[in-house]
Amino acid sequence: MPLHNSDGSAEWIAGHNGGDTRIICSVNGPIEVKTRDELPTMATLELVVRPVVGLPTIRETLLQDCTYGCLRSIVLRTQLPRSLIQIVVQVLDAGEPVEYTVYELVGAINSSVLALANAGIPLSGLVVAVCLAIVEGEIVLNPGVDQLKKSQSTHAVAYKVDNGPEEVRFRLVMCESTGLFTQNELLQVLETAEDAAREENKKMRSMIEQQVAESLAFA
Amino acid sequence: MEPRSFPPDVFARLAPEIYFERFLEQGSRPTGRKFTEFRPLLVQQGRQSELAPSALGSAVVRAGQATVICGISGGLTDFENEGGVYANVEIHRGGRSGAPTAEEMVLTRRTHELILAAQIDPSNFKIDIPDSIEPCRKELVLNASIRVLSRTGPCLDLVWAALVAALNDTRIPLFAEDERTHNIIPTCERKPLVLPETLVSSVSTFGLLKSGEVLADPDGPTEEACISNYVNVAKTDNGLLTKFSLLCTDTTDGVDAEKIGEILSLAGRPVSTV
């Protein structure tokens, strides 16, 4: 929990060298909602993505749109009616050239899911996002900046993992693929992404378990 | 108490889910189209800007009730490698103006990403002045102003079709150095852009129902109110993909490889040019 004044927070560090992209996320909620935004049957979900420098542009609006779509599918909003869940994603280090958004998108999704869990917001499961690229015909997981620049296509893929036993099905929630690729390449990317998401899911779950164990008063 | 009955259009607004379900049960859609049927897309190129004489290129695209207009104007930039095509999408909703809506911003960004993915040759935007001793640093910027009139549903497909048609119509002026002021001025001579094959892709939008049924080209208030899963596919004529974006948050069985294969085989809508 990197931010102590928020209800929940998480920092996501990823990339080829294990630290090119750094994204921090805070979650506050359930808090009071403005009457204008109040929904009588469910919680209002507010998400802001802030870039490293300056004000958010349309680049961040698209990141926000995709991240919001993923989060909407897991937050059990009906359990907190007439309240506000406020999520702020701040990019600390993009770790990729400005033309690309894969790492930031993956980081925004993963950090907000962890921060939501940290804040104790009821979730129906986790969304796990992974980043891939096709470089010289090969699928590369977590490509480096040089590989991104050389890549034919980039892919950010997110899977939803429901709460429950280990061998649950991974459901494809989001896929943002850009570049030049064939149908077969796309299907192979999704296959690789699912395996990577299974690994990532284990890591995220153990992080949450550790956090819960630490926060238990009588543990 | 007597049961109330409503005319179909009122019922569609009151209970869109039930209204939509009745259609689906009978294998049809409120728009009368089949599940995998697209609206016919009618593209009218400006023919060297008859539609807008001051523009470098223009096009109008119509599909159903929706119309999208794209006009291309030119400018010069002093920054190196900044030349290119920049799109701005506006959706007209009954005369209200103000800050751009989230949908407009997302559409603009998605169009920009499609332009980047198409990889238009940067030499198109370099200004070549033969008489000049010093190499010219200025580059050409094409501003595509895209306006969606009478929006009836998701419109990335129409926006992209309008932009591609307008870029095909675009004739950029050749430039010369003004002898007196040494400024760079456009001449009367014009040349077309050299566009890559990857640009001539068609974007197809699909809605995915909770049951997993695929609906091509969702349109109209009922379909928009009931569909929460969308897929956008940009496919070139030779079957390559330049964009695949999927957001499926509400499906019972999820989206598997077979479903994606089905969607990709349906992508690539026919376009009729006037």
Image (cartoon, coloured by chain):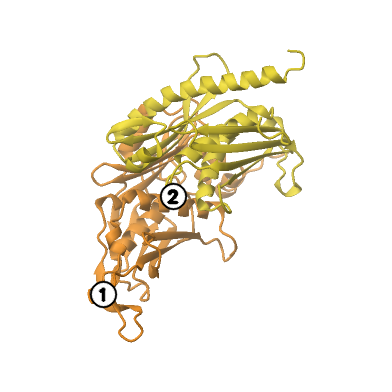
Q: Is residue B252 left or right of residue A151?
A: right
The chain coloured yellow in the image: A
Residue A159, position as x, y percentages in the image: 48, 28
Q: Is residue B147 above or below residue A94?
A: below
Which residue occupies 49% across, 56% down? B151
Residue assigned mark 1: B133
Q: Nearer the viewer, residue A35 or A41?
A: A35
Residue A139 sits in which quadrant?
Answer: top left
Q: Is residue A200 left or right of residue B162?
A: right
The chain coloured orange in the image: B
Residue assigned mark 2: B110
Q: Nearer the viewer, residue B129 or A128?
A: B129
The N terminus of chain B - image quarter: top right
Amino acid bearing label 1:
Ile
Q: Chain of mark 1?
A: B
Mark 1 or mark 2, which is nearer the start of the sequence? Answer: 2
Amino acid bearing label 2:
Arg
Nearer to us of marks 2 and 1 is 1
Mark identifier at residue A149: none
Residue B127, position as x, y percentages in the image: 29, 68
